[in-house]
Amino acid sequence: MYISSATVLLSILALSAAGPIGVVRSKRANVLTVRPYSEFQVSDGVAGNALAEVNANFPIDTSDLASVSDSDLQIIKDARETAEDAETGTGGFNDEIAAAGDNADTTALQNGKIKNKVLKLQLEVLALQIEAAQGDGDQAKIDEETTKLNNNIALDKAAAGQKSVGVTDTFSG
C-alpha cells in the first residue's frame, strides 16, 4: 500500500490546525470599586464574624484567582494599606486605644482593632494568592500571613457578641 507524501502532509496539517492554539487567560470585568475606608471597614458593630464581613466587602471569586483584573488587585492592595494605616496611623486604633486608657471603650476598640487586622490580613493573603495564581507567587509569604490571619480570626471569634468600635470618627483614611 502506497501513501503519497501529499496525503501525509495534508494529514499533519489537518491535525495541527485542529489542536489548541494556546491558553488565553481572560481577565474578568472589574468587580470592585474604589471606596473610602469608612465604606469598607468592618470594625463597627459586634465581634465574631470579621472574616465574613471582609469577604462580603471584597467579593472576589476565589475559585478563579488567575482571572482577577489588575484594577481589582490594585484596589485590594490599596485597601490593605489603608487598613494598616487605620491601625498605626494618626487617629487610628493604636492612638485611640492609648487615649482610652483602661475603661469599657478600650475593649470595644481592641475588638475593632482585631477586626481591622482581619481586614488587613485577609486582603494581604488575597492579594498574594492572586499574584501566585497569575504566576508571581511567594508561598512562604502566603503561609506567614495566613498564620497571622488565622490567629486574628480566632481572637475575633473568641470575642463574639462583644461590642466592636471602629475609628472612622478619628481616622481620615
Image (cartoon, grey):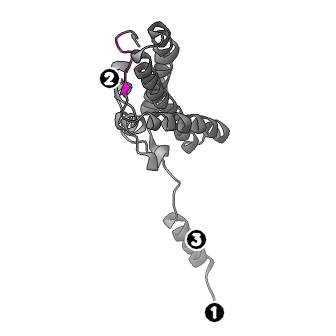
Locate residue 96, reporting x and y percent: 45, 11
CA–CA distance in space, label 3 to label 1: 19 Å
Classify 2 as above or below 168. below
Locate residue 77, reporting x and y percent: 49, 27
| Label annotation for residue 1 | 1
Crowd around label 1: few <14 · some 14–19 · many ≥20 (10 Å): few
The boundaries of the magenta stretch are 163-169
Q: Nearer the viewer, residue 170 or 122?
A: 170
| Label annotation for residue 39 | 2
Q: Nearer the viewer, residue 135 or 43?
A: 43
Residue 44 visible somewhere in the drawing: yes
Q: Residue at x 32, y 23 (%)?
A: 39
Classify 16 as above or below 113. below
Q: Nearer the viewer, residue 124 or 110?
A: 110
Locate residue 132, reporting x and y percent: 58, 41
Locate residue 160, reporting x and y percent: 40, 36
Q: Residue at x 40, y 21 (%)?
A: 108
Q: Nearer the viewer, mark 2 or mark 3?
A: 2
Magenta segment main secondary structure: loop
Q: Nearer the viewer, mark 2 or mark 1?
A: 2
Compare marks 2 and 3 and give the one earlier in the sequence.
3
Quadrant where the C terminus is found in the figure: top left
Judging by the rendered image, the residue that carries numbered circle 3 is 12
